[in-house]
Image (cartoon, rainbow, N blue to C red):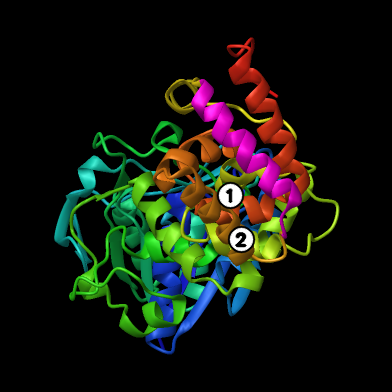
Amino acid sequence: MNIVRFAPSPTGFLHIGGARTCLFNWLFARSTQGKFVLRIEDTDLNRSEKQYVDEILDSLKWLGLNWDELYYQSKRFNLYQEYAFSLLNSGKAYKEGTATIFKVPKNTQVTIYDLIHGKIVIDTEQIKDQVLIKSDGSPAYNFCCVLDDALMGITHIIRGDDHIANTPKQILLYEALGFKLPKFVHIPMILGEDKTRLSKRHGATSISEYKRQGYLPDAIVNYLALLGWSSGNNREIFNLQALAKEFSIKRINKTAAIFDLNRLKWVNGYYIKNLELQNLVELLVPYLEKQGYITEDFDWLRGLVKLYKTRFQTLPRFLELTKFFFEDSVDYQTQAKDEFLKSEQAADYLEKLKTLLEQGNFSTVENIEHIVRTLVQGLNISASTLIHPARVALTGGTVSPGIFEIIYFLGKEKCVKRLSFVIEKIRNNWENTQT
């Protein structure tokens, strides 16, 4: 059975790179009917914090990356001490004060057979003696990593290629302890679009922050899978189950992946567009409540979400696009106002529209369309001559869904109030730009 592990250190939140490493391990385990082990490497007692442990576990659950076994290194210190003592007794390690140090054999070579990078040979002259147990009694990373991987039966170590420097040190420890070597798979790094190491300025942040920013777990998983792996058929959309079926180490790229935040937004927009409507409404409600836009689910919210479903790529963007429905004031775009809301003729047309809407039946979008088109016909003007200024008057800008739907969801009271305001402003040459 193939057994893999993801071993985060709880000294910070789970970020994009760590999440992708976890995903590749998870996919390999699931695609081969293997086992996925989660190991919290919390041996740094000064820097490890429970809030980071909780965030890592919550983020992995949110992404759908369930584990088969869970271990904490902080609960295994006696085990590390025991094996360090055995190396001391065999003469393969020595004491330096209260620390235990492994003697690195000299005049030899360590060979790594990596499933991505191929054969890598390191001379041990380049490797200094390795700390096993620090002077404070805590185990060093390479030592407890090797012990845990061996004792947990890890068959494949899938991790970032920034760990290649650790691998020869760990191989020496495997050999000294008499353990069978696992297979090594070092994944190329994720870089920013400027080809430098991924950082916050490229949009890299914690998985929990992406969640707060309105990204969906399926979208993040889909995008992360394509950062350094390809299906071989140019397919771009995969759910977790499809990924588990398609995944193969052989199709992991040998070159660094480039993180593109705009591409992630596109993938997220795809999942939003294809999400079941009620599920999407339920995801949006907390954002609307936090903003104070709703105190309970409006009867018409479902219709409004449906109207905008293809227009936003993150959940908070829905609020930005629709705030004129919820707020009494409107921010009028200067260019739109200057183009469509300056002339007396525009004010006259809007006055007539306001009168008809005030008297009209708002029960259906079709009723509203009939009102507007009847006015256009009666004025003997093109529909755009009325609709463009009406759109700007009601929304503040020139881009929105259909004007009849806008009027319907705004409701009679807001439409009349907003049109009255704009008519007055046009006739007073716009003393200010906000309601």
Q: Is residue 44 left or right of residue 21?
A: right
Along the line of sight, the residue nearer the viewer: 412 or 132: 412
- Looking at marks 2 and 1 on the same chain, the residue that comes earlier in the sequence is marked by 2
- The answer to whether residue 388 shows anywhere in this view is yes
Name the residue nearer the viewer: 430 or 427: 427
Q: Is residue 136 left or right of residue 248?
A: right
Q: Determine the residue positioned at 18% across, 53% down.
A: 255
Is residue 360 a member of the stretch shown in magenta?
yes
Badge 2 amino acid: Val
Disc 1 residue type (three-letter): Phe
- What residue span does the magenta drawing correspond to? 344-361
- Alpha carbons under labels 2 and 1: distance apart: 8 Å
**What mark, if any, has residue 1 been given in the picture?**
none
Q: Going by the image, does 408 lie left or right of 25?
A: right
Q: Nearer the viewer, residue 51 or 319?
A: 319
Q: Position of residue 56 (x, y in %)?
A: 62, 56
393 in magenta:
no
Do callouts 2 and 1 mark residues in contact (Cβ within 8 Å)? yes
**What residue do we see at 43% from left, 39% from top?**
385
Q: Which mark is residue 318?
A: 1
Residue at point 29% right, 59% down?
A: 186
Q: Main secondary structure of the magenta part?
A: helix
Q: Which residue is mark 2?
A: 305
The image position of residue 391, as x and y in percent, is 53, 40
Residue 95: image x %, image y %? 52, 44
